[in-house]
Amino acid sequence: MKITVVGAGNVGATAAQRIIDKQLANEVVLIDILEGIPQGKGLDMYESNPVSGADTRVVGTNNYDDTAGSNIIVITAGIARKPGMTREQLQDTNAEIVKNVTKSIAAKSPQAILIVVTNPLDVMTYVSYKVSGFEKHRVIGMAGILDTARYRTFIAMELGVSVEDIQALVLGGHGDSMVPLVRYTTIAGVPISEFTNPQTIEKLVKRTRDGGIEIVNYLKTGSAYYAPSAAAVEMVEGIVKDKKRILPCAAYLEGEYGLKDTYIGVPVMLGKKGIEKIIEVPLTPEEKAALHKSAQEVKSNIAKLKL
């Protein structure tokens, strides 16, 4: 198993380290355009192996030849948000970066599965899908797992319960229009409505939608990376171990949920082939309308692309 992480910034480097610690690959390649950064970080990670007990070969590089034959490629390259910026404001710059990365990576690893982390997530995953020419099940966006993790965290913080006992699902685009499904949110199998009032639930939903910018506002010069990298690596693990995990990911829809020609967060089954099935959960008219509104925002941004 050979896994490449594109982008040696905070998200990429942390994702690479998590992959190594979990021993999900025989070889991890960390690639970046900045000379010395992936080499230095990669060597540092390799030198931690004798302590952690991992036995993964780590290669830091600026050369796409070193990525050849990768089974999974995690794309994190792009500029990060700053206070006051929306994810959409990153679109033109990051679309060009993701387009060039995808061309280079697809040429060297034509059978790989691509996991896109770059923002604006749903649009960048669409870019990677179109540019790579890969089948839709091999190009997946990481968003729903992160959004759901934030939602579960905020519930745990508010109600004083363990995150382990919280089951939740956040659908839609990775942005202000994301759709946390309150009706499917449970604590140890009991609906969240039995634990708190509608006002508190709405506050938790809003905080989830604002979860990314909350961290950006604290950091000021960067954006989140611990939780995004953990979410991406959960996807990697599901694929590597063929776990058949049911997880919310950005998937290309062709009629599911009444949506076409767009990437949007929905529950999928992840296994060794990538997305092995799109799960259509029953939605109320209000939930479906919210999902369609979210998808329309993604589609309007896709329409602005110059591919």
Image (cartoon, helix red, strand yellow):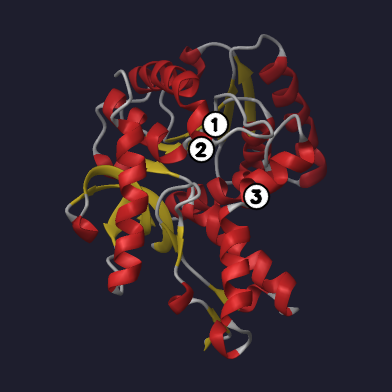
Residue located 65% across and 44% down the image: 213
Residue that mark 2 sits on: 117
Where in the figure is residue 178, as x and y percent of width and height?
46, 55
Residue that mark 3 sits on: 227
- Between 177 and 75, the one nearer to me in the picture: 177
Q: Alpha carbon of mark 1 to alpha carbon of mark 3: how far? A: 13 Å
Of the 4 image quadrants, the one containing the C terminus is top left
Vertical side of 86 occupied by 151: above or below: below
Kind of residue at disc 2: Val
Q: Residues within 10 Å of mark 3 (few under 14, many from 20)?
A: some
Where in the figure is residue 149, as x and y percent of width and height?
59, 60
As helix, strand or loop, the secondary structure at mark 2 comes to loop
As helix, strand or loop, the secondary structure at mark 1 comes to loop
Where in the figure is residue 123, as x and y percent of width and height?
38, 35
Q: Alpha carbon of mark 1 to alpha carbon of mark 2: how far? A: 5 Å
Residue that mark 1 sits on: 76
As helix, strand or loop, the secondary structure at mark 3 comes to helix
From the viewer's perspective, tell me whether residue 260 is left or right of residue 77.
Answer: left
From the viewer's perspective, tell me whether residue 187 is left or right of residue 257.
Answer: right
Q: Residues within 10 Å of mark 2 (few under 14, many from 20)?
A: many
Residue located 69% across and 48% down the image: 214
Q: Alpha carbon of mark 2 to alpha carbon of mark 3: how far? A: 12 Å
